[in-house]
Image (cartoon, helix red, strand yellow):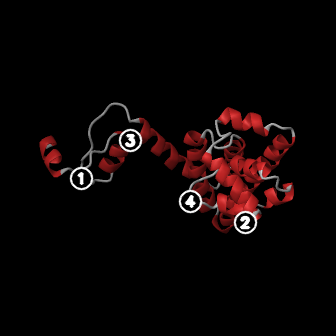
Amino acid sequence: EGSRQHRLKLPLYRGAFAHKIASLGGPSRAMPTDEPSMKDKCVDWAIGLAGYGSAWWMPFLFLAVSLANSLTGGVFVWCLGVLQATLFPVVVLSNGKLGVLLGPLILTIAAAVATVAYMRLMQTSGADALLASTGAKDSKWLITAQSWAEKYGVLGLLALKVAPVPIPTAAVVVAGGIAKMDEGKIFAG
């Protein structure tokens, strides 16, 4: 049967997911393994986490992860960003009509706290150190972001935030600060 699966190019399921498929009585295309892969463990964890979506502590966990992701400037997007992207639909979909407001509100609070923190950092001349440590001091992107902030003001910052490429709050605040924008306008963007 193994050669038949290879000829038909059927997907091979491994780990805990394979056991779930087998328990449903579906076609067994599972490859027997002793230990589930890391991917299977992560998928199982995310599915298990969804069961706690309406728990009182889940919005606070989502807020903590969103704050950490915003305050670190997206440096840990490989873990915090993925966790934030996992928690958002869990919180929104598990809390009914309240969730539709709760999810975006939590993201807004995290972005607002990060904006205030980065504006304070800009006031203490920490922007040069921040840009030097991230390697973005003379990047083309930063020059483009700065020019958008200078030319279009708040609309330029807003365009940077809704661009198809995810741009961290820190980068938008730094671009606005370098463009010598008013703090109120940076916060509005």
How far, Cα to Cα, is label 1 from label 2? 54 Å
Please tell me which of labels 3 and 1 falls first in the chain: 3
Q: Which residue is mark 1?
A: 27
Q: Which residue is mark 2?
A: 155
How far, Cα to Cα, is label 1 from label 4? 40 Å
Do the residues bearing badges 3 and 4 touch, measured as CB atoms within 8 Å? no
Is residue 30 found left or right of 142 in the rendered image?
left
The local secondary structure at tag 4 comes to loop
| Residue 178 is at least partly visible in this image | yes
Front tag of 3 and 4: 4
Tag 3: residue type? Ala
Q: Position of residue 184 (x, y in %)?
A: 86, 58
- Callout 2 crowding tier (Cα within 10 Å): few <14, some 14–19, many ≥20: some
Q: How many marks?
A: 4
Please tell me which of labels 1 and 2 falls first in the chain: 1
| Mark carried by residue 164 | 4
Q: Which residue shows up at 43% across the image and 36% down it?
A: 38
Do the residues bearing badges 1 and 2 touch, measured as CB atoms within 8 Å? no
Q: Nearer the viewer, residue 13 or 124?
A: 124
Tag 2: residue type? Leu
| Residue 51 is at least partly visible in this image | no
Front tag of 1 and 2: 2
- Callout 1 crowding tier (Cα within 10 Å): few <14, some 14–19, many ≥20: few
Tag 4: residue type? Pro
